[in-house]
Image (cartoon, helix red, strand yellow):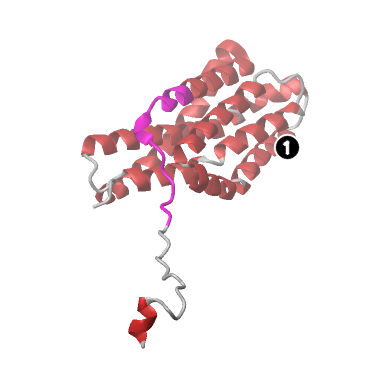
C-alpha cells in the first residue's frame, strides 16, 4: 500500500484545500491587470493593443516555461517549486505597482509569467503524490473549481480596490495578499516533497570470470 492510499480523509481535504487555494491565486493573477486597462491607458498614454501585448507576453512566458517547471518539479520536488512560483507571481504584481513607465510592465509580467508557469506541474504532482487514489477525481475537480473562482474574484477585486486606491494600490494589495499566502504555504509541512519516484536499478550479476562458483555450476 502506498503512502497516498493510506492517507485519512482529513489529510486529503487539507492538501486539496491548500493546493486548490494556490491554484486559485494563480488564476486570480491572470485577471488582476486586465480590468485596470482603462486606468493604465490614461496613465501611460498607450493603446489597448499595447496593453494586450503585455498580457500576451505574460501567458506566452507562462506557457513556454511549463515544461521547464515540470523538470524542476521532478528534480527538486513540487513544494519548493510551488512556493517559488507563488513568490514570483506576487513579486511581479508588486513591481507592476511601482513601474515608472509602460515599458517596465513587460519586465514585471516576465517575472510573474515565470512564477505562473509552475502551478499545474507542481499542483498535479502534489495531488498525485499526496491524495488517496480513490479521491483523486474529487481532488482534480476541486482544483479546477478553485481556478474558476480565482478568475471570478479578480475583476471584482481589481475594480473595487482601484476605485479607492487607484490601479497602483490595487496591484500592491494583490501582491501583498499573494506574498502573505506564499508565506503561509511555506509553513505547511504537510505538503512535504513530492517528486516522481525513481525506478530502482536492477541488480547486476558480477563479472566473475570463468573461475567462480557460478561459472562452475554452468558447466
Residue closest to the eye, 58 or 188: 188
For the C terminus, which image quadrant?
bottom left
* Dot 1 crowding, Cα within 10 Å, few <14, some 14–19, many 20+: few
Question: Left or right: 202 with respect to 97?
Answer: left
**Residue 67 at what x, y percent from top left?**
57, 50
Residue name at image x 25 percent, y 51 percent: 134
Q: Secondary structure at mark 1?
A: helix
Q: Quadrant of residue 181?
A: top left
Q: Quadrant of residue 59?
A: top right
- Magenta residue span: 181-198
Residue closest to the eye, 141 or 89: 89
Residue name at image x 69 percent, y 35 percent: 54
What residue sits right under mark 1 in the picture? 49
**Residue 110 at what x, y percent from top left?**
67, 35
Specify whether residue 28 is painted magenta: no
Residue name at image x 33 percent, y 36 percent: 15
Residue closest to the eye, 214 or 11: 214
Question: Left or right: 219 with respect to 28?
Answer: left
Amino acid at each position: 500500500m502506498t503512502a497516498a492510499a493510506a492517507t485519512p480523509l482529513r489529510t486529503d481535504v487539507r492538501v486539496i484545500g491548500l493546493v486548490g487555494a494556490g491554484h486559485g491565486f494563480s488564476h486570480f493573477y491572470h485577471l488582476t491587470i486586465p480590468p485596470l486597462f482603462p486606468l493604465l491607458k490614461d496613465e501611460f498614454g498607450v493603446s489597448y493593443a499595447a496593453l494586450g501585448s503585455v498580457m500576451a507576453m505574460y501567458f506566452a512566458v507562462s506557457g513556454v516555461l511549463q515544461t521547464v517547471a515540470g523538470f524542476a518539479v521532478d528534480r527538486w520536488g513540487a513544494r519548493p517549486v510551488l512556493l517559488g512560483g507563488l513568490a514570483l507571481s506576487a513579486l511581479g504584481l508588486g513591481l507592476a505597482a511601482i513601474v515608472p513607465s509602460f515599458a517596465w510592465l513587460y519586465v514585471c509580467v516576465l517575472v510573474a509569467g515565470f512564477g505562473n508557469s509552475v502551478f499545474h506541474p507542481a499542483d498535479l504532482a502534489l495531488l498525485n503524490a499526496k491524495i488517496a487514489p480513490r479521491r483523486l477525481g474529487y481532488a482534480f475537480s476541486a482544483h479546477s473549481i478553485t481556478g474558476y473562482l480565482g478568475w471570478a474574484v479578480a475583476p471584482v477585486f481589481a475594480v473595487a480596490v482601484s476605485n479607492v486606491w487607484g490601479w497602483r494600490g490595487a496591484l500592491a494589495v494583490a501582491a501583498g495578499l499573494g506574498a502573505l499566502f506564499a508565506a503561509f504555504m511555506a509553513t505547511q509541512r504537510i505538503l512535504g516533497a513530492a517528486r516522481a519516484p525513481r525506478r530502482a536499478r536492477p541488480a547486476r550479476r558480477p563479472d566473475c570470470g570463468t573461475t567462480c562458483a557460478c561459472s562452475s555450476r554452468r558447466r
